[in-house]
Image (cartoon, rainbow, N blue to C red):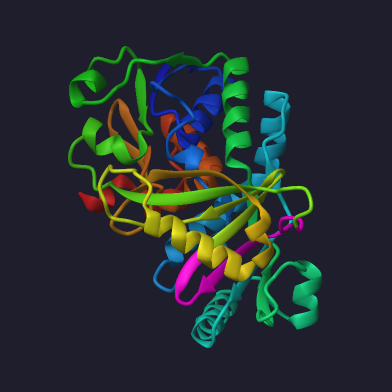
Amino acid sequence: MRMRLAIVGGGVIGLTVAWRAADAGHHVTVHDPDPGRGSSWVAGGMLAPVTEGRPGEEAAQDLGSLSLERWPDFATELSAAAGRPAGLRTQGTLVVGLDPGDRSELDHLVQWLTARGRQVATLHADALRDAEPGLAPGIRRGLSVPGDLAVDNRALLGALQAAGERAGVVHVAAPVADPAALTALDADQIVLAAGARVADVLPGLPVRPVKGEIVRLHHRPGALPPPTHTVRALAHGRHVYLVPRDDGLVVGATQWETGHETTVTVGGVRDLLDDATAVLPGLAEFEFAEVIAGSRPMTPDGLPLIGRVDARTVLATGHGRNGILLAPITADAVLAELAGEPLPALAAAAPGRFA
């Protein structure tokens, strides 16, 4: 049944739902003053439920793995619908540690992942250097996780906007920033995908902003080439990731509980660059291209809020650091909810768990 669908929020979740819903025949409007330029624009683009996983986060890892299974077909369909690449990279992920404490933590991670049946292989010096020649000489052992992929987030956002427009999605620049504006929307159904600002629109939702800073580096002629794999590292107890792009790489990400403040700090950039060059020394010759911060929409248990909250409103928010990873399965769940057929696999993300 064709419906008038209003989507509040034009990040990766809102744009994915919009494209899928319009493609299914619904009349879709996306309400966002600057679509594609929120936290999704800042992201590293890792599709990494295995290497992101930690003990106590089993439900999040299972949900992420379920969505990752959808990603290759999702990217192919999106590229065809948009007429441009979706930015998927399939080279896999390497995980390394710099000092003995870091390597010990990786050993514990391997034990936990192996017990959960996840595909992880240990690489020693020669094999590790064959995979990524630019790694620092002191890194003698690492993990290969071929199933953890990555995507160029900005290519993805461009493809989603193009596919949505081709399918008939209409963009409305006027913001929906409070409950009154939400109530006034002229729509049969509303999908709230407003990220870290969703609690402003629907007060009481347990979603808070957590700032993350990233650095983008461009390759310069004469410098060593960027890595082909995503490289995740523990550097003296700090997590850093290095995600390849066609013109260089993205380095991230810090995590700060600072509310909606998204200024970039000297200390945050220093730590990212120190850790990145400790892992890949050749990055010191790259061009410093951009530094930017965004707000991740976090929930108390690290799982998103996906599902109906009233007869006219469906939530698709609170994805934390995994919004891009979870975009395909979130869109599937929202369309199923709109059709009155909720997906059982998404029960762990039901908004009612915080009632």
| Magenta stretch encompasses residue 37 | no
In this view, the residue in front, 346 or 275, is 275
Q: Residue at image x 34%, y 15%? A: 174
* Horizontal side of residue 200 vs 218, given as left or right: left
Task: Give the x, y percent position of residue 347.
Answer: 39, 51
Which image quarter: residue 55?
Answer: bottom left
| Magenta stretch encompasses residue 234 | yes
Task: Give the x, y percent position of residue 37.
Answer: 46, 31
Is 71 rendered above or below residue 91?
A: above
Q: Residue at image x 51%, y 73%? A: 235
Is 109 rendered above or below residue 16?
A: below
Is 68 rendered above or below residue 155?
A: below
Is 120 rendered above or below residue 301?
A: below
Which image quarter: residue 277?
Answer: bottom right
Which image quarter: residue 19?
Answer: top right
Q: Residue at image x 62%, y 22%? A: 162
Res. 180 visible in picture: yes
User: Magenta segment range?
Assistant: 224-240
Res. 254 visible in picture: no
In this view, the residue in front, 242 or 189, is 242
